[in-house]
Amino acid sequence: MNMVVYGVWTFCAAVIAFVISAVVGKYLIPYLRKLHFGQTILEDGPSWHKEKQGTPIMGGIMFIIAISAVTIISTLIYAFVGENIITAYFANIHRELVYIFAGLGLALANGLIGFIDDYTKVVKKRNLGLTAVQKLIFQFLAAGIYLAVLGFAGCGTETIIPFVNGGKPVDIGFAYYIISAIVIVGVVNAVNLTDGIDGLDGSITFFAAVSLMLIASRMYCLGVTAFSAAAAGACLGFLVWNFHPAKVFMGDTGSLFLGGLVCALAFAVRMPILLLPIGIVYLCEMFSVILQVLYFKITKGKRLFKMSPIHHHFEMSGWSEIKIVAVFSCVTAVFGLLSFMLVIFGVSSY
């Protein structure tokens, strides 16, 4: 019976989020065009991206609405019936609810930062929004508030690392908050850097969400399972409009939201360590930028990659946008499956 409930619950969350995201896009895109909220392409970007000039941005609003609506409704239902369904497996439903709502808040806060950034770009008609320092300040503030909420709610400073301590939680004390804040801000910006070609960020996040959905199910976190399913479904709904050739871009509004979302899901299953394998593509994108800058400075003008982030290097090497999305998505899917296997064999389902 529990498996049937899990399946139906997850399927409904994914399908409803998909429909909402796709339908909102049908009305949002013309509205964004009417407001002339179009993307300005960087001068130092790939020359063929110039044809994308004027494509509406802030399309991330469609999956933000879908994920938020489905998550709030499903979690409220879960709060009333969850204990009757899975009491035998999950003893602390209160903690799970805190992780879900606080996590959604983290994602929305980062989405708001992205919205401010996008709006600044649109109003000033240039591809520069908030400064890097301003973004970091706001992002660390959002991460700090999120972690403070978890702390005050009694979620503790424990984390699960597969195959360590018999797969049971390990308490790392106050260092948990410092490390977590750095991880959250780092991953949020890594996801933001991944948004550079049609369908890439949405596709990778879809597979990341599916991986975390499977892991949440394994940990008998029904609420987080629905949260993850909604994220996956909403990303697919967005891809209806964003897959090559894109009719809309998610903008920083969407990419920063997705960064906060992926972090929230990993923290909700108490395994942020899994952001390393599940977010392998995000991290490669981020470190390609860091390495490019360092190499450029050390060698006084030479480049390690043809262009960074790394997806542009493959573009400059002759790969089509569709091929890049397909390969990067497959890599994410493989590492997501690996993460799921680590949980199955290395984590206690206490």
Image (cartoon, rainbow, N blue to C red):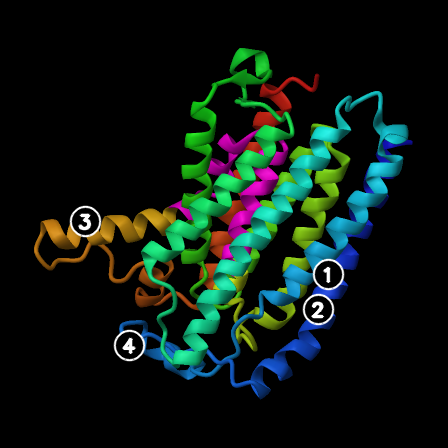
* Crowd rating for badge 3 (residues with CA inside 10 Å; few <14, some 14–19, many 20+): some
The residue singled out by tag 1 in the image is 18
x and y percentages locating residue 247 in the rendered image: 56, 78
The image quadrant where one finds the C terminus is top right
Residue lying farthest to the top in this orientation: 166
**What's the residue type where badge 3 is placed?**
Leu
Label 4 vs 3, first from the N-terminus: 4
User: Which secondary structure lies at badge 1?
Assistant: helix
Label 4–label 2 contact, CB within 8 A: no
- The residue lying at 58 percent from left, 18 percent from top is 169
139 vs 69, left or right, is: left
Label 1–label 2 contact, CB within 8 A: yes
User: Which secondary structure lies at badge 2?
Assistant: helix
The residue singled out by tag 2 in the image is 22
- The residue lying at 33 percent from left, 62 percent from top is 131
The span picked out in magenta is: 255-283
Q: Is residue 114 above or below residue 328?
A: below
**What's the residue type where badge 2 is placed?**
Ala
Residue lying farthest to the front in this orientation: 152
